Image (spheres, rainbow, N blue to C red):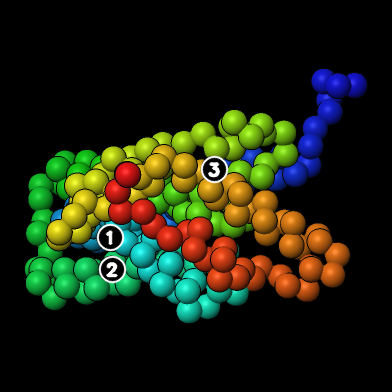
Amino acid sequence: MGFFAFSIPLILYSIYQWAVPVIIFTALLGFRWREGFWGNILSLGSVLFSILAAVGWWELLAYFVAVKFPKILFFADWMALWTIFLVSLILLESAHRFMSRVKVRFIPAVEYAGNTLAILLLGSALYGFYLFAEDISPLGDAAVAGETREKMIQDTIPVQIFRMLSAGNLSGFSEIRQFDVYGDFREQHLKRRQAIMSQMVGGENATVGFGGDADAVEKIKPETSKP
């Protein structure tokens, strides 16, 4: 009996995990293949720089927004990250299209192989960034049934990569401002998710919804360096 036992939420989550990368790569193949090797290489640069900009500055923007609007505290990080990424991507893509109006064409073998590689790199970058955004989302994947707390707070590969890169990329003009300087990013966001669930099922407090308060806002103030 136990051999055939299964969890519907776990199955749906597994499908969701596989569906996201498939959708990303399929969409890129469908919409970006005609851009060619040259166009996709430029777009790869735009995506990578936009990711670095988002990872480097989302904490400051999230804190600023949360101070002004404490009621959206639990979504401030997620909103700030995607806002910076999308704005940077739109600006960079527009600049590339303006500066590079002629599409460079290579011999067929190079064009095909290069275009395939560029799309694979684009998809990998976008999927990695999506996984990082899931860590920030207040309803992210850390609450999957059956996972231990130790596994929930274990650093993912995107978190490790962005922590390393943020110390040298777009870190500040006068001082280094490293992302997740204390290495407790996953644990902090797990606590935030738990706070949301507590409010949602907390009887009369359920009407509060996802709102935070001024005291909770101070807890997400980004640290610039270790003491």
Residue 221, quarter of the rendered image: bottom left
Q: Secondary structure at mark 3?
A: helix
Q: Amino acid at mark 1?
A: Ala
10 Å neighbourhood of mark 3: few (<14), some, or many (≥20)?
some
Task: Name the residue rendered at 32%, 62% in the picture.
Answer: 57
Q: Amino acid at mark 2?
A: Ser
Mark linked to residue 187: 3
Tell me the mark number nearer the camera, choosing from 3 and 2: 3
Q: CA distance from mark 2 to mark 1?
A: 7 Å
Of the image marks 3 and 2, the number of the one nearer the N terminus: 2
Q: Position of residue 198 (x, y in %)?
A: 74, 57
10 Å neighbourhood of mark 2: few (<14), some, or many (≥20)?
many
Residue annotated with mark 2: 88
Instruction: Evaluate if marks 2 and 1 touch, with contact meaning CB atoms under 8 Å apart.
Output: yes
Q: Position of residue 146 (x, y in %)?
A: 72, 33
User: Front-most of 194 and 85?
Assistant: 194
Please say if 147 is above or below 120.
Answer: above
Farthest residue to the front: give it.
Answer: 227
Task: Name the residue rendered at 12%, 64% in the picture.
Answer: 103
Mark linked to residue 53: 1
